[in-house]
Image (spheres, rainbow, N blue to C red):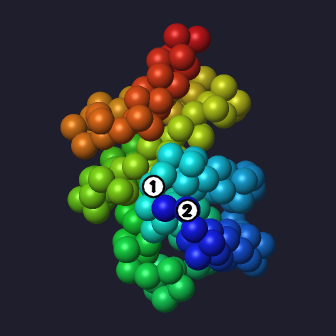
Amino acid sequence: MRSPEVDKQIEEAIKFLVFVIHKSGKNPKPVILHSIRVGLNLYILGYDKDIVIAAILHDVIEDTNTKIEEVKSKFGSKVAKLVEANSFDDSIADRTERYKENFERCRKAGKDALIIKAADFFDNADYYNLASTNELANWLLEKLKYFIDNSKKELKDEALYREVVKKYMGIAKT
């Protein structure tokens, strides 16, 4: 997977991420660092460049004014499909229903979309202890458990999935 050309394409995704977050970012959390970690974790694990690029860009639709057409024109239809699958539908008011709908879109988009979702959980789970309320912390854990239970069939053979399960077990014990 690693080559100067692949690395250059991944760097282009990082530049685009930084540009669109700077231009129209809506999330007060450190989205840039999170998105880079999600993508680089998959890069280190040897996943395909399109999966890595989509992982880097997985939050740009929901956290900026970027449209999926722009992602498609810059990075191709496979990346756009994966980014779109991993983007929440803000028109769904209930957060649990919004998450479940998002999960089903990832499942329909295929294993690659679920791998990105797993990498997103793997990174985000380190921050669950910072939840502002116990209710939010419990909801985050429920969401992670839902993902683990419902993606096992597709991801059980992935080392990343097993790491997400380990992380959940460590958090759920505390």
Where is mark 2, residue-wise? 2
Residue 149 position in % (x across, y down): 29, 31
Q: Residue furthest right?
A: 22
* Residue type at numbered disc 2: Arg
- Nearest to N terminus: mark 2 or mark 1: 2
Judging from the image, what secondary structure is the residue with disc 2 in? loop
Which one is closest to the eye, mark 2 or mark 1? 2
Q: Residue at x 49, y 62 (%)?
A: 1
Sort mark 2 into few (<14), some (14-19) or many (20+) by Cα contacts within 10 Å.
Answer: few
Number of numbered tags placed on the structure image = 2
Residue at the spot 45% in from the left edge and 68% down from the top edge: 50
Horizontal side, residue 169 vs residue 36: left or right = left
Q: Nearer the viewer, residue 174 or 135?
A: 174
Crowding near pointer 1: few (<14 within 10 Å), some, many (20+)?
some
Residue, far top: 173
Q: CA distance from mark 2 to mark 1?
A: 10 Å
Q: Residue at x 30, y 36 (%)?
A: 157
What residue type is disc 1 on?
Answer: Tyr
The residue wearing badge 1 is 47
Image coords of residue 34 (percent x, y): 66, 51
Label 1 sits on a secondary structure element that is: loop
- Residue at horizontal 44 percent and vertical 38 percent from the top: 160
